[in-house]
Image (tube, coloured by chain):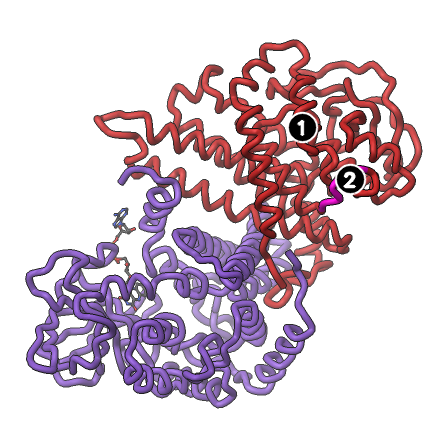
Chain colours: A purple, B red
Amino acid sequence: MHLAYTSEQQAFRAEVRAWMEANVPKKPLVTLEREDGYHQHVEWERKLASGNWGMVTWPEAYGGRGLDLIQWLIFEEEYYRAGAPLRVNQNGIFLLGPTVMEFGTDEQKARFLTPMAKGELIWAQAWSEPNAGSDMAAITSKAIRDGDHYVISGQKTWSSRASFADWGFGLFRTDPDSKRHKGLSFILFDLNAPGVTRRPIRQLHGDPGFAELFFDEVRVPVANRIAGEGEGWNVAMATAGFERGLMLRSPARFQAAAERLVALFRKHEAAAAPAAREQVMQAWMDAQAYAYNTYAVASKIMAGGHIGAEASLNKIFWSELDRAAHRTAMQLLGASAELRHFDGGALNTWLEGYIFSLSGPIYAGSNEIQRNIIAERLLGLPR
Amino acid sequence: MDFTITEDQAVLTQGVRDYLAGVHAPELLRALDASDSRRSADVWQGLVEMGLPGLLVPEAEGGLGLSLLDGVLIAAELGRAGVAEPLADTALIAAPLLGKAGNQDALLAAIATGEAKIALQHPVNPWVADLNGASHVLSVKDGALLLAENNGRADLLESVDPLRRLYAPVAAEGTEVGSADALLDHAALIDAAQLVGVADAMLEQATDYAKNRSQFGQPIGSFQAVKHHLATAVVKIEFAKPVIQRAAVALAEGSASAPVHVSHAKLAAADAAWAMSETAIQTHGAMGYTYEVDLHFWMKRAWALSGAWGDRAFHLARIDAAVIGGALPIGPGHSFA
Ligand SMILES: Cc1cc2nc3c(=O)[nH]c(=O)nc-3n(C[C@H](O)[C@H](O)[C@H](O)COP(=O)(O)OP(=O)(O)OC[C@H]3O[C@@H](n4cnc5c(N)ncnc54)[C@H](O)[C@@H]3O)c2cc1C
């Protein structure tokens, strides 16, 4: 164990910092859940790509920098330190990109990875259905083979960014007689293809952050299928594997929130409830603990190890610390907490953040599902 | 930057775990509980033969010269096994302090051979553990750490933990060998490390019980309420471990921020162990409320170690001064400040 950065790592940090200081928009962007904000965020992705900062962990061959996981952590720290915008390209970076790298053909890699790296195509994930949420194996949307096409019918829902995104990736039942995990395939589709209807859904904050997708005999080339027919479940599980367990939420995000929370507490200290002081300290401690753990997992993976069911521990820890930190902020704000904009017009980012933190324990496998996984796979309790 | 433990560290830790699982099983705890002294010369001799008292003693004095990071890994094993002998105080807390003090070669050598045992007295605790039987006492006066031979006869104070032997504090005296704060930081760190071991032991007992006890025709561990209580405890325990390791490295390096990280470690470990203790007894039902089931040894150790070497209020106050007070840089990029 050696808990200090090498001179190369420090130089790398300085390089990221300099680029961010020169390029991060001075004025916060409009939320990416709204059309104007979405386009601002796409512009930002292209800016990142122009500096080759879009896909830092991807191999250079696919438009990345081939950075290791410690460098990724440093990059993220500088990204959040600079207050840079949220990543509208997140699905591409962490979910679809690694999946195509692992399971895609050379032709698929050439076709999809470069535009993804450049921020030219923004992707939405379409796994959930009205009757397949936690129970994803209950998917019923079908993709029926017709020559060298699939004909897709059915419905997806809760697809983040699908209101405005370009393409989607989803799981569809290619064997109509199959049940549960079998007979599903992983298929990429153009959200503007004939027969696709998007119905934006207003989220808790009022903006259309996700959408329902209706498929009415949508023709999709078989060449858009990743991996073999019927292998979709395994591909999806791999996608949800280590990248997601480690990379979905970097610690810097929560360290930044804890830092702002400490500042908020100092401002409201005189009127704060006695417990608030301890909650603020807990937010800092938990963000730090999450950082140490992430550095430990990153080091382990770099040394050839793997992350398995431990990913479920991470998911619970970051989502619950995030909600607690934002709840503390809301309580510190007291009667101002409900204001969407403060005096002077600044957005109440604590309110926005609290609203979003409520979804953390739900998406990416609800925390109840994660607790089931911990109990059954880590502790070996009977199903 | 490398946040892994080495293969050697993993092998050593596993070796100690296996050894203790053999010689320091729950039957031994019950036998000690039934004895007058609650201590066993045989057990101590076995620990000596394993080389454990000399783990952190420099090689020149006959020890293994290992680091505080090794120390916290071994301390967790002592907690897991519910070790009663005063090994942690002497080998993992006093030894590194005396190593730093200088001029203590003879005493360090005697620690490595198992002849010397050091009792630790600090005003933060209203007791001294294992004062009887200790050859020396480290005590505190005006912020200084003093070393003296132990000649006093001490009054026993009864702990809820039947295997802890606590005594009323004695007059502080002796030669100066360091600072009171250094004792507190080292002891709080090793205390935290023992607490996660204690928590892991309770988790294992509760999990085993949940697999084997049936109600309504099925193992209680198949009920989701039971699963989720245990899973919640696992999260707390696993996220305390890297905090302890990080604090061990900071303290070993003498970093100025080490006390904050030690306090974080102590709070995280105590919260995890305390939560685990309540989950473990709940999982056991009425069985858990008895003296017959071994769980109580670890529950009581968790309560004891949680209050020892700085309670919640003490350690929160140090976090408060650093984080809210602003002495410590915080935020992204300051993970290792
Ligand atoms: C902000 C946000 C963004 C999202 N983005 C996407 C996206 O881009 N693409 C996509 O495909 N999906 C997305 N989702 C959907 C998300 O994956 C699902 O919400 C999630 O899988 C839970 O499914 P559900 O909402 O149907 O809840 P349900 O499965 O109906 O669960 C409801 C409640 O029951 C509990 N429950 C269910 N089953 C069990 C069980 N076996 N044991 C114990 N408790 C159980 C759950 O934990 C939850 O508390 C998003 C969701 C949110 C909130």
Horizontally, residue B290 falls left or right of residue B251, namely left
Is residue B41 shown in magenta? no
Could you tell me what secondary structure mostly forms the magenta stretch?
loop
Marks 2 and 1: in contact by CB < 8 Å? no
**Nearest to the observer: residue A275 or residue B148:** B148
**Nearest to the observer: residue B159 or residue A231:** A231
User: Would you identify the image quadrant in which residue B60 lies?
Assistant: top right
Count of number-bearing discs? 2
Where are the magenta residues, as a range?
B62-66
Vertical position of residue B218 compared to residue B253: above or below: above
Residue type, numbered disc 1: Leu
Q: Which residue is mark 2?
A: B57
Horizontally, residue A101 falls left or right of residue A22, namely left
| Helix, strand or loop at mark 2 | loop
- Mark 2 belongs to chain: B
Quarter holding the C terminus of chain B is bottom right
Q: Residue at x 33, y 66 (%)?
A: A239
Q: Residue at x 63, y 55 (%)?
A: A269
Residue B119, how many percent across, how many down? 78, 27
Q: Can residue A209 be seen here?
A: no
Residue B194, how many percent across, how many down? 61, 36
**Nearest to the observer: residue A73 or residue B121:** A73
Q: Which residue is mark 1?
A: B47
Q: Residue at x 45, y 75 (%)?
A: A86
Task: Check if mark 1 and mark 2 are on a common chain.
Answer: yes
Residue A23, how many percent across, how many down? 55, 86
